[in-house]
Amino acid sequence: MTFARSLKALNMVESAGIGATAAFMSLFANMLTNSYILVGSIVAGYGLAQALSYAYFAKIYDRKGPASRLTLIRLGYLLCAAAFFLHLAAVDGLSLFAIRVFAGLATGIYAGALIAKSYEATHKKLALAGIISFGSLGWVMGAFGAGALKEMFGGDTNIVFALSGFMFLAGFVVSMRMKADEPVPPAAEGMAKVTNLRTTLELFRHNRTVYTSFFLRQLGASAVWSIFPIFLASELGAGDFAIGAIYSTNAITQFVFMNRFGHFIQSNYYRSIQLGAMLSAVVFGLYFISQTYLHAFPIQVMLGVSWSALYIGSLLFLLDRNGEKATSSALLESMISIGAIIGPLAGGVIAELFGIRSVFVFALAITLCSFAMSRTLKGQTAAADAAEKLTRSGKDLEKLF
């Protein structure tokens, strides 16, 4: 198996493992707790642990470079296998919360190293989109496979957790077959290790517009996804198999769009990010007025396009413009996780007080704010670049004197 194929396999199995559990986590948590607020708290605990883990381990990758690459990937996949198998032991809300925190810490270990290595493995941006697209294919395997298996085993959620654990175990096996001394392409030389690291706060400030816009979209989305399976089952009448198929539709669209239309994303970061935010707002509005689970399928196609444009556009923007590849990409992943902390809590409270459909109104409003901010990205980026260039020029003059 070539190195690129190994990276595709790793992206695929980790998304399959996470996607399988994500598709039914809120239903399982609601069964144990019977409270939207507690469901939101469990999802938030996972997000907080993941965000902290992303930031910490990505910094290690940028500081140590290739020496830490496979170590972090292998450790992360092994611990993820243990964490997802441990879901089988959850008996109440408290035990599930503790297990989800462990899973969040484990999934954050390998993420920055995996994305940075995928970027370093080739100088072609389209190849990066192609590698990441296998993560979307993994979501198809995970969500659809989990839905089919859960229905086959009489609605037993344990089969879903077992599937997730085996996916990460397979990823660990793949990582053990990868060579630690895999050569870096000439176009990517010098990327693997950064000597003058900026602090995480400095990195965030330099790219604050793209991070904040992305976070706002994820805040609204996370509020929705925390109650989404419950919405599909209780409001739209979807069964376990249909829920898995609905999640799979989104993932299949992402896989196709990233591979077939990656050139569109590459050609203009700013346009892609704006398109992603705008279509996300439309998605939430359409879900608010949907009446049957059949309506979800075309909406999920639109969601797949919106996420592909937003995520790959933001990721390429950050990787191209920052030397700290792992940290800058992990910060983007942290925006997802922080959104997954606040969003589910907000979604749970809103659903409890105003009804489950009101969550989509909240998501629509907050995503429109994301779209408005994305429209300022190009101008603010140009101003930031000019200021940084002026600062460097001043330092060069100081050296002369």
Image (tube, grey):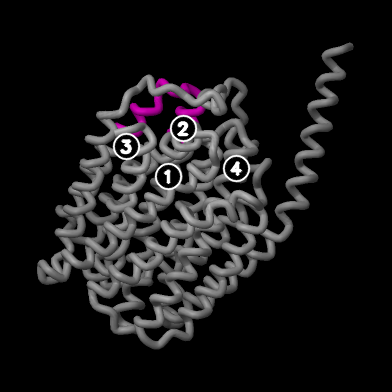
Q: Label 1 is placed on what type of residue?
A: Ile
Sequence-wise, the earlier of marks 2 and 1 is 2
Residue under numbered circle 1 = 131
Where are the magenta residues, as a range? 56-74
Q: Is residue 21 visible?
A: no
Prevailing secondary structure class for the magenta stretch in the rendered image = helix
Residue placed farthest to the left in the image?
153
Which residue: 54% across, 38% down? 124
Picture quarter containing residue 323? Answer: top right
Q: Label 3 is placed on what type of residue?
A: Gly
Q: CA distance from mark 1 to mark 3?
A: 19 Å
Which residue: 51% across, 73% down? 283
Residue 193 is situated, as x and y percent measured from the top left of the image, at 52, 23
Q: Secondary structure at mark 1?
A: helix
Figure disc tally: 4
Residue 399 is situated, as x and y percent measured from the top left of the image, at 83, 14
Tag 1 near tag 4, CB within 8 Å: no
Sequence-wise, the earlier of marks 2 and 3 is 3
Which residue: 45% across, 63% down? 222
Asked whether, in this view, residue 78 is left or right of residue 324, the answer is left
Sequence-wise, the earlier of marks 4 and 2 is 2
Residue under numbered circle 3 = 76
Residue under numbered circle 4 = 318
Asked whether, in this view, residue 240 is left or right of residue 362, the answer is left
Sequence-wise, the earlier of marks 1 and 4 is 1
Task: Locate the N terminus and report the quarter of the image it occupies.
Answer: top left
Depth order, front residue of 101/14: 14
Q: CA distance from mark 4 to mark 2?
A: 17 Å
Is residue 61 in the magenta section?
Answer: yes
